[in-house]
Amino acid sequence: MLIKLTASFAVALAAVWTVLSPSSAPSLVSAPAPPSQEQLWPGSNAWASMVLDTLTLEEKIGQLFVSGAAATAEGLSSPEWEALLMRVEQGEVGGVVFSTGDAARQAEAIRTLQTRSPLPLLITQDMETGAGMRLTGATKFPPAMALGATRSTELAYLQGKAIAAEARAIGVHQSYAPVADVNVNPANPVINVRSFGATATTVGALTAAMVRGLQDGGVIATVKHFPGHGDTAADTHTQLATITADRQRLDAVELVPFRQAVQSGVMSVMTGHLAVPALDPGSQAPATLSPRIISGVLRDELGFNGLVVTDGLKMQAVRQAGSPSEIAIRALEAGSDQLLLSADEPGTAAAIAEAVRSGRLSERRIDASVMRILRAKAWVGLDDVVEEPPLIEDPVADAQLSTPEVRRATRAAHVAAPQPELLQRSEALGRHIARNAVTVLREDERLLPLVGPDAPRRVLTLILDDGLDPLTGQPLVEAIAAHTPEQGGTFSLRLSLGDPDAFYVSALERVREADVVVLASFRRARSGQGNVALPPRHLAFSQEVMAQRRPVMLALFGTPYVGQSLPGAAAFIAAYGDGPAEQEAVADALFGQIPLRGRLPVPIPGVGGTGEGLQLAQQAPRLGTTLDAGLRDDARQRVDAVMRQAVADRVFPGAAVAIGRAGVVTQLQGYGSLSYGGSAVTPDTPYDLASVTKVVGTTLAMMQLVEQNRVDLDAPVRTYVPSFRPLGGERITVRQLLSHTAGQRPWFPFYARGILDRQDVFRFIHSDTLRYRPGSRSVYSDFDMIVLGEVIEAVTGQTYERHVTESILEPLGLAATSPDLPDDLSSHAVGYPRWLP
């Protein structure tokens, strides 16, 4: 099918929209006009007009309805499913919104629907965090607030495009995302982490970027919940919410992301069931039913020419406005195009037809909405056009290929569950976003990272679960266990709200035995929940944990706002989401295996302000995939083939190989054996680094001392090591040792001459004769490095081994690297110089 994308963003913004308050100075440059319908859906008018002319009034009204379905085994065998199929076959449905289910099952259901519908159906779904938000067998990305913590429009665009790829594979054309609400109310029980943040400009930029990603991927984006659901403590699933802000504040905050989305070419806007008196004076009607808000502000002031879709018309916030048919008619009067999940759709359709016949609604008004719907269908490739006509000259065969049945089958012939390669790319992107979003605040006791010889060895992980899933927090527990030493006594407990008191008492006893506690809160914003505060039982327990005088690291999975109720934590770690990617990212952050880049996208009272967050470099490499590292998988396969062939050809008996990039190790593997016929090489086999230590240890340690002004590069070596007096080398400087221009001999076979004592080696070097005039040439020399080691010991008062360990190896997290291999390992090391004393 044809998907018309090439001109869809011909009028995209070149500059950010500026919102003018009444007191602002007028802009010298006027904003570009919002996209017209032709600019939103180029080339779609002819087909849409042709189809519209063939429809009866009842068929036109049918196009307005978006009916619900569930891609579960029960949902697709229910009476509701059979009733939907009948209405689809009769042309009474224009679109279908799927809720939960399985990706493969939903794809099959969509193929069935499309082949039975006289007109193509616009398939929609709420994919705020991807297809995996609703479906198994698809990717669930971190929530919008995680993207807000990254401040990256590039990542927002990439996530939108990745979501679109999976959506189109499954057969979905329209996503009810992204959320353009500015979450300025910390008590918001329903938006919360679904928002990009609390700053209008940031939310606007990320919203526009995700819109572009979705629509570049061929999916209609839907920004919601117009005119803004961020400043409310009410859940519109259960009650009407009222936005009390005045018009000036609405222009400066709530409307900013919607303006920017409209200017960026968003094709669909979802209305909120919100009373906004500043936009509709004297009315308490929800925006969905307000002509002043939908037709006046959205259409006329913002210039939006795309689809307007209602939020669910079965929600309590709008149901109080009247019967299902009255609600739907008022929504159309207000300016809506798509009626989402209306109750009693057949009865409501009949009532709308009667409203047209009585003159309450005009057929012209219905036609305007149907045209927008049809143009949107044409844009996503549902205009029943075959991309390339068949190369058949037989007119009978041509006629058979163009029958309605063939065209219907063609609409969804490609629909299937996402391929593994697509899922792998999406999952890698999700992990990348999660790692960049992790936000760390306070960290009073300098606990991070939990690595090194002085790191806490007994780590207790407490999972506070507000649900009933016994696997909540399991990825976090497993990741922490993988990072900690086996002998450390690391353990974990999950505490649900229904556990007996004795379980909580036992958990406190474990707290007293721990060196550090990771207190992981899994508090999610759920529809109908009422609030997002930490449940009283978990709050009381957490306060008791804080009182045990153990360092507590509060890890917030889900809403970060619960941190304000626990100000005594040694560190606050916000992940924003609760999926495996977010949990593994927090574990990586605890152990220094990712850089800390996230910054709070919202203020958390008593914890931190917007934009705050520790910025720390990665301390140690982590294991990951080639996608994580940005490497081609075939490169790893080529390395593997080379190593196996080299061992087979006896180029060397064995080797250990590590492949990685950008702090990510993608492969650790041993090949062959320590010696021909000896023990097998493993990734843990110790290797002697030999002269590499001169760069890793000696040179780095010396330059650190220079930076600290403890060593002068141009001072004579005798300043630090008075016994260094080689013949002709009284004025040799530290710089000459470092640059191998000191004139000393390259090496000497001490072991062959029986010189094995450390002090005897030093005496030999100190009284040796130079081989050339210092500074006249550069000749690599072991003697230069040995003398530099003496300088380090003289300046620091430590042995060379101890100083290099403390100043270089431990800060870098090189726990398995040592200047001097222990006796219990030296016999198993490859290339270890056993002749040394």
Image (spheres, rainbow, N blue to C red):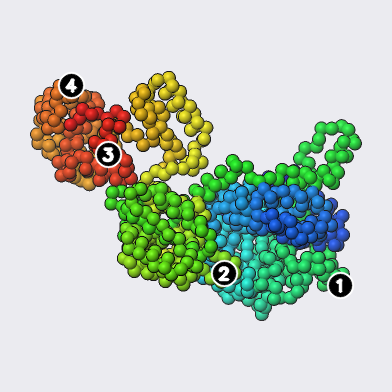
Question: Label 2 near label 4: C-beta < 8 Å?
Answer: no
Question: Label 2 near label 3: C-beta < 8 Å?
Answer: no
Residue beneath label 1, please?
358
Q: How many marks?
A: 4
Question: Label 1 near label 4: C-beta < 8 Å?
Answer: no
Residue at x 79%, y 45% (from the top left corner): 409
Label whose residue precedes the other's in the sequence (3 or 1): 1
Q: Is residue 807 left or right of residue 471?
A: left
Is disc 4 surrounded by few (<14), some (14 to 19) or many (20+) residues within 10 Å? few
Residue beneath label 2, please?
529
Is disc 1 surrounded by few (<14), some (14 to 19) or many (20+) residues within 10 Å? few
Q: Given this view, does label 1 or label 2 mark the residue nearer the observer?
A: 2
Residue at x 69%, y 76% (from the top left corner): 320
Residue beneath label 4, please?
752
Label whose residue precedes the other's in the sequence (4 or 3): 4
Task: Please provide percent x and percent y for residue 149.
Answer: 48, 57
Distance from Cα at disc 1 to Cα at disc 2: 42 Å
Of the 4 image quadrants, the one containing the N terminus is: top right
Distance from Cα at disc 4 to Cα at disc 2: 80 Å
Task: Please provide percent x and percent y for residue 76.
Answer: 72, 55
Q: Nearer the viewer, residue 768 or 443?
A: 443
Classify mark 2: helix, strand or loop: loop
Q: Nearer the viewer, residue 774 or 674?
A: 674
| Amino acid of disc 2 | Gln
Label whose residue precedes the other's in the sequence (4 or 1): 1
Using the image, tell me which numbered label, if any, was put on residue 818: 3
| Amino acid of disc 3 | Ser
Q: Given this view, does label 3 or label 1 mark the residue nearer the observer?
A: 3
Question: Label 1 near label 3: C-beta < 8 Å?
Answer: no
Residue 201 seen in render: no
